[in-house]
Amino acid sequence: MKRTFIASALAALACSTAVVAQPVDYSKLEIAITDLGNGVHLLGWQGGDSLILVGDDGVLLVDTSVAQMGDKIRAAVARVSSKPITLVINTHAHADHFGANEAMGKGGALIVAHANLRERMAKGQTIAAFNQTIPPSPPAALPTVTYANAMTLHFGGDTVQLIHVPNAHTDSDTLVHFKRANVIHASGTFGGDGSYPFFDSSSGGSLTGTIAAQEKMLSLADANTRIVPDEGDPGSTAVLQACHDALI
């Protein structure tokens, strides 16, 4: 009971810090591109991380960020490849991960996500920790392909596993595992620097689910795996193990 209370208090503290942060001027944000090998690149900026995988016929994009970043993401992709964005994966139902979906969908991209994410986008939701109400998304922004437990995609010479981890950061989380590139996008279940992860209880998240998500990633990873967080540089398996042990 005491451990649960301490964990909840720490999570609330992390949330309260975000609430008082100043509004972001997206016009001033720049996207840094890091080549992770085997066609996978990290698109990083203050406030978020996306991944792209370049294939022969197009580009796979993990998370579209907020609507205001859509043009910058497309410009960053164009710096890597002249091919169009043909496939989008959303990792979870927070607006900073699906906000530019509509633009990508209208541009011809197929959008894939967990079924809970589509439902939350279609109905709208309130994130209590941030006192934020997210209205229902327009039809063009909604995922057109959803899955329940797991899905495997074959793209750009890689095998891309989508794995649902229930009630972790949210109830809609997808771990994205690029097997050939040995890269995992952790959704919101891990901070690359080992910091305490935020689980959004109003969106179905939980401490227990976050621990289970980290255990799933540890089962997939080896000593060389790069684990991509919500924001910041990729973390190592050793850092993930230490974070997991601290949560336990």
Image (cartoon, rainbow, N blue to C red):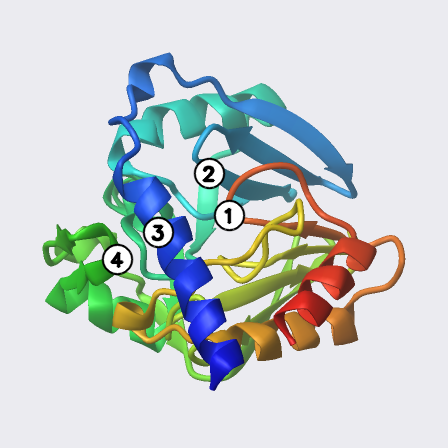
Among numbered discs 1 and 4, the one appearing first in the sequence? 4
> How crowded is the residue under tag 2: few (<14 C-alpha within 10 Å), some, or many (20+)?
some
- Identify residue type, mark 2: Gly
Give the quarter of the image for residue 175.
bottom right
142 sits to left or right of 171:
left
Tell me if label 1 and label 4 are in contact, CB under 8 Å: no
Residue designated by label 4: 129
Give the image location of residue 189, x and y in percent: 54, 62
Up-down: is 128 above or below 48? below
Relative height, residue 183 to residue 164 (above, below): above
Q: Which residue is mark 3?
A: 15
Question: What is the distance, in whole Å, between disc 3 and disc 2 at their CAs?
Answer: 16 Å
Q: SS for tag 2?
A: strand
Q: Nearer the viewer, mark 3 or mark 2?
A: 3
State which quarter of the image contains the C terminus.
bottom right
Marks 2 and 1 in Cβ contact (< 8 Å): yes
| Residue contact at pointers 3 and 1, CB within 8 angstroms | no
The residue tagged 1 is 230
> Real-space Cα distance between discs 4 and 2?
18 Å
Q: Mark 1 falls on what kind of element? A: loop
Q: In the rendering, which numbered label is found on residue 48?
A: 2
Does the residue at mark 3 contact the one at mark 4 (Cβ under 8 Å)? Answer: yes
Earlier-in-chain disc, 3 versus 4: 3
Q: Amino acid at mark 3?
A: Cys
Dot 3 or dot 2: first in sequence order is 3
